[in-house]
Each structure stands twice: as structure tokens, then as C-alpha cells.
Amino acid sequence: MQDLNLRIEGDVNFSDERKRWTTKLDQETKLVLAEDEKIFMHQSLSTPCFNVISACYGIYLEDLHGNKIMDFHGNNVHQVGYRNEYVMNKVKAQMDVLPFSPRRYTNSISIEFSEKLLSYFPPQLNRLLYAPGGTSAIGMALKLARVVTGKQKIVSLHDSFHGASIDAIAAGGEEQFKKYMGEFPDTINISQPKTALGVNANQDSLAEANELEEVLKNDKSIGAFIAETVRNTDVIVSSKSYWKRIREICTQYGVLLILDEIPIAFGRTGAMFAFEHFGIVPDIVCLGKGMGAGIIPMAGIVTKEEYNIASDIALGHYTFEKNPLGAAAGLAMLEFLEDNKIIEKVISDQAFMKEQLMKLYDSHSAIGDVRGIGLLWAIELVFDRGTMEKDCDLAEKVMYYALKHGMNFKVSGGNVIQLSPALIINREELKRAVNILDNAFHELI
């Protein structure tokens, strides 16, 4: 068995299962993959790749031979589905008029999108700034926190992920990203909260929340606490009491609460933004991924009027800061969610998925836990439910079985099957996906 430290993600490109998968590919696909491997820098979870796609639409990817793959991963950009016709038409129309806006100018579509986006937030959160990607949004949030508080240290959760740039991995950082990068003395990690959902749902995690207060009592140079509102990779949904306590502590000690909603905003959890579930108002929210509707890279931060105090420096200064195409895509994405009542659909889908996945849990002892919210679900695979020892090998085998049968998903933590489909997915497609998993467990266990 391989070192689990190298298996924190289950689709690593150097595992034995990956090698077996690659040998079974057709010659045409192998040739394209070989060309890709010659050109691109090699990095874990990317090049070398495991297949070649030629099209995407709705919930599907399509490979070189027209095989359809239900995408339950999507890098979290596909809330409204791939190549959404409504969004595509809006972006094409914008492209014919104003495809780019130099940074010193504004444009009407960016203002229109911003006003629409802010309308979904509590009134206290009424200022924003855009960036070309989520990692850059994190960087802007960290810079703003230093301006507001005059302090440069931050607290984050152990094994958290907030992006791949040096400042973002300093803010959290999984081993895949921190390796070889040296020390990050300005970051203090505290424990992840327990999940409040699932078969193994735990207590309210107030002890984990109070760790933050203990750190802040002993270090007056901390300016911010950053965390995902819902941990995306292995789907940890903490309790309302946890987040209420975190908000209380941050307010008491004058520390900014930065919530990273880059992978989970825009309806994924059954609310436009995940913090709505917990009855709190953060100081800064980071957005990205689905913000550009899977068409245009688009990200940003939303914050409070009182923090609009950095006019003498450049918080972002990105070339595509007020990107008209990104704004058109984002506005159309919001309109599509609203007009088609997608969030209401996701709330209904949540109940359906819970019922279906609990049936899998009852049928297969290798499933140690099932948990989720909205259309974000985790199936945790173990050798034994008593010890909850991770079964990383089984998770990888199930992933490649699913790929063979037309379903793509992410494996996190080595043993957690994460299911994150496009929000437009219908019930028959959800049933088909669950059946693929059921068949995989029957065949592989």
C-alpha cells in the first residue's frame, strides 16, 4: 500500500491504479496524452492526465470517441451545467460589443452584474472587487485584512485549502501544495470542526471553535481567521453553533472573519451562499469557480463599506479586473439560477440524495459514512466501521470503475468519494449515478 501522505487526493497521477487505467486506453487517446505530457509541466493531480475530452454540455463530458461521462467533479465551475445555452448567448452578445475593458475604465455590464450579485448578500456586505481566479481573490482578502487590522498573522484550519499561489497556500495548504515550500510563520492552524451531518455526525464542535479564542488570547498580532464555510473536498458541514461561536470570537478580538466560498457558492449547498445556513455575516467572502458559469474565469471578494479604506494601494490590480465577458457570464448565471428556481430544486435533490445514498450505506459495509448538503455529498470508504480506517485502494478502484462506466468524480482525503454534479442534473441521471456506485461496490468488494 502506498504512503497515505501521497494519497490525500485519490486521483493522483502516479498510483498503481492510474497505471492500470492508462494501459487500457485506446491508441489514439494514448497518442494525445503523450503529446500533452511532452508539452506541459508535470504536476500531481494534473499532467499526466487520464483521458482526453473533446466536448462538454449539460452534465456531461465527451471523450474522443463520443463516450459521454457524467461529471460529478467539474472543478466546481459547472453549477448551471456546461455550455449553458442562456449563458452562452449572453456571453456571445457581449463579445460582439465589448470583449475587454482596460483597467482604468469601467463598463455597464460589470456594474449591472455587481448590483445583481450584491442583492443576494446581507446589506452590510456591499462592496466588491474582482479577480481572474479564486486564488487571487484569497490574496486580495488577505491583503485587505492587513490593511484593516494592521496585523499580518492569520489563523486557518488544519489541512485546509484556499488556492495554489504562495500566499494562498500560506493561508492553509494541503501537503500537495506546501511540500518543498518552506515555513509559513504567519499562519497558525487550529483543528477542523467535526461534521454535523451524516451517519457519524458529531457534537456541535464548540471545543474546536474555542481553540480560536485560546490562540487569539495568546497572540495579539493576528488579524484574520479564514475557513471554508463548508469544507468542499471531503464535505464537512459544521454546526450552526460552531459558526455562531466563531463569529462571536472574531468580533470580540477584532479579527476579520474571511469565508472561502469559492467552490460552494451559487446554490451548491441549497442556498445562494453557504453562510446563509448558519445565521452569520462574515467580514469578507471569497468567490470564484462557478461565478463565471464554467465559461470565463471570474472571482472576487465581497466585503463591508467600513473596509473600503485601501484606496492608496492596489489590492488586486488585475488586467481582467472588470472583465465584461466574465460579468456577462456571471449575470446570466444568476439569472438562470433565479428564473429556473435551481436552488429550490437543489433543496429537493438533497432529500433524494440522502435517501439514495443511505440505501448504499445499508447495503455495503465498506461505506463508513454518508454526509452531504444540497448537491454536495461524500461517501467515506473504510476497512471497518468500528475503526474507520481509510480504504484508499477501494476508493481509487471505485473511481476508475465509475470512469469506465461513464461517471467522473473526485476522491478526497484518500478515501472519500465526493459527488458534486451540475445543479441542473435530473433525477434519472442522479439515479444512474447511484446505480453505477452500487454496481461498483458489488463488483469490487
Image (spheres, grey):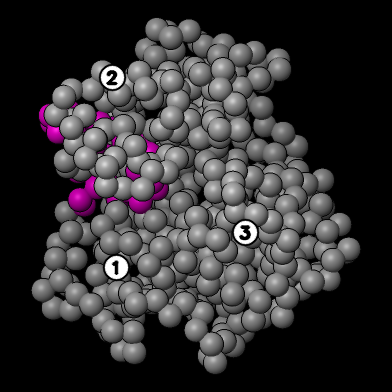
User: Residue at 74% of width from left, 45% of height from top?
Assistant: 191
The image shows residue 308 at horizontal and vertical percentages of: 56, 85
Badge 2 local density, few (<14 within 10 Å), some, or many (20+)? few
Q: Is residue 376 visible?
A: yes
Between circles 2 and 3, the one closer to the viewer is: 2
Check if mark 2's residue and mark 3's residue have beta carbons within 8 Å: no
What's the distance in space between the residues labelled 2 and 1, CA to CA?
39 Å
The image shows residue 37 at horizontal and vertical percentages of: 29, 40
Q: Is residue 280 visible?
A: no
Judging depth in this view, the residue of 82 and 392 nearest the camera is: 392
What's the distance in space between the residues labelled 2 and 3, CA to CA?
38 Å
* Residue 229, placed above or below residue 30: below
- In the displayed structure, does residue 67 sit left or right of residue 288? left
Mark earlier in primary sequence (2, 1): 2
State the residue position of label 2: 23
The quadrant in which the N terminus is found is top right
